[in-house]
Image (cartoon, rainbow, N blue to C red):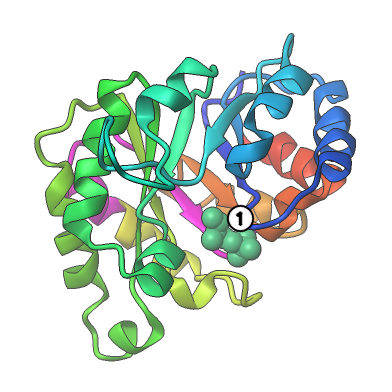
Amino acid sequence: MAKQLVVGNWKLHGSIGQIKSVLGEIAQAKLQSNVGVCVPFPYLMLAKQLLHNTHVQCGAQDLSQYHIGAYTGEVSSGMLADIGCEMVIIGHSERRRLFGETTEQAGVKMRAALDAGLFGIYCVGESAEQRREGRAEEVVAAQLQVLQQLPIGLFAVAYEPSWAVGSGMVASSEQISPMHALIKSQLDERVKVLYGGSVKSNNAESILAVQHVDGVLVGGAALSAFEFVEICKAAR
Ligand SMILES: O=C[C@H](O)COP(=O)(O)O
């Protein structure tokens, strides 16, 4: 069984037809554990049905920092757990950059996720400008602060430099390995640290071989069953 974790993030993509076709194929691939797919909220229950009898877990891409109440449009961690969702991505760079989500909010969401028994995938990463200014480590260290009190083993961290997301530009092993080491040293050596940013079937093997890489968070390539299954097969 592969120890490395492969998680697909569908972002704002999908339809009933596409989910049935792609997840149906993934279900046929008989993947071992440590694989997850995070689909848009409306398709979570369909994904659960399609992946029933497989080891592939289902996840959401965000949740509310609130548990219950007058918060129109929100989806709570309890609701996600109630429908059988197993994991959730929190603090993705697109949530931070496009929707103004703060590290403090992401920290509250992480606690809400863990309280409901969901496995949290907490995203960190610097922008191109922050890296140019030599501030990448400082930015990531600040984003990690809110995880300090959380129980190890119930969450993973995804290092996704925002300049590598959807750009076709993969961070180099010289950039990935020390950042993953820094994340582990800030939290705990046992924390799984995933890399995200333009992971495809043709680069997955080399990324997954980088020291301190415990898995990958896959965006665009997760929309193709062939690509995603190939990436899962590269996990060690
Ligand atoms: O959550 C996934 C990441 O944002 C990576 O997206 P990408 O593989 O399309 O670059």
Residue lying at 28% horizontally and 52% vertically, measured from the top left:
181
Residue in front for this viewpoint, 104 or 3: 104
- Magenta region includes residue 197: yes
- Is the CB–ligand 1 distance for label 1 below 8 Å? yes
Judge whether 47 appears above or below 91 on screen.
above
| Quadrant of the rendered image containing residue 156 | top left
Q: Toward which corner of the image does residue 13 lie, by quadrant?
A: bottom right
Determine which quarter of the picture holds residue 112.
top left
> Mark 1 falls on what kind of element?
loop
Pointer 1 local density, CA inside 10 Å: few below 14, some 14–19, many at least 20: some
**Which percent across, then down, holds residue 4?**
53, 33
Image point (53%, 73%), residue name: 164
The amino acid on which the numbered mark 1 sits, given as a three-letter code, is Lys
The quarter of the picture where the N terminus appears is top right
Q: Which residue is mark 1?
A: 11
Taking depth in this image into account, of 68 and 220 the one nearest to the observer is 68
Farthest-out residue, front: 70
Examine the structure image and report whether residue 66 is included in the region drawn in magenta: no
Q: Position of residue 12 (x, y in %)?
A: 64, 57
**Residue at 34% of width from left, 89% of height from top?**
129
* Relative side of 186 to 130, left or right: left
Which residue is at 80% across, 39% downward?
A: 19
Residue 99 image position (x, y, % from top left) = 38, 68
The reply to whether residue 24 is visible in this rendering is: yes
**From the viewer's perspective, is residue 113 above or below residue 49?**
below
- First to last magenta residue range: 181-199
Q: Does residue 190 appear in this view?
A: no
Image quarter where ligand 1 lies: bottom right
| Residue 53 sits above or below residue 93 on the image | above
Is 138 left, or right, of 23 in this rendering? left
Residue sitting nearer the eye, 147 or 203: 147
Image coordinates of residue 210 in percent, x first then y, are 50, 52
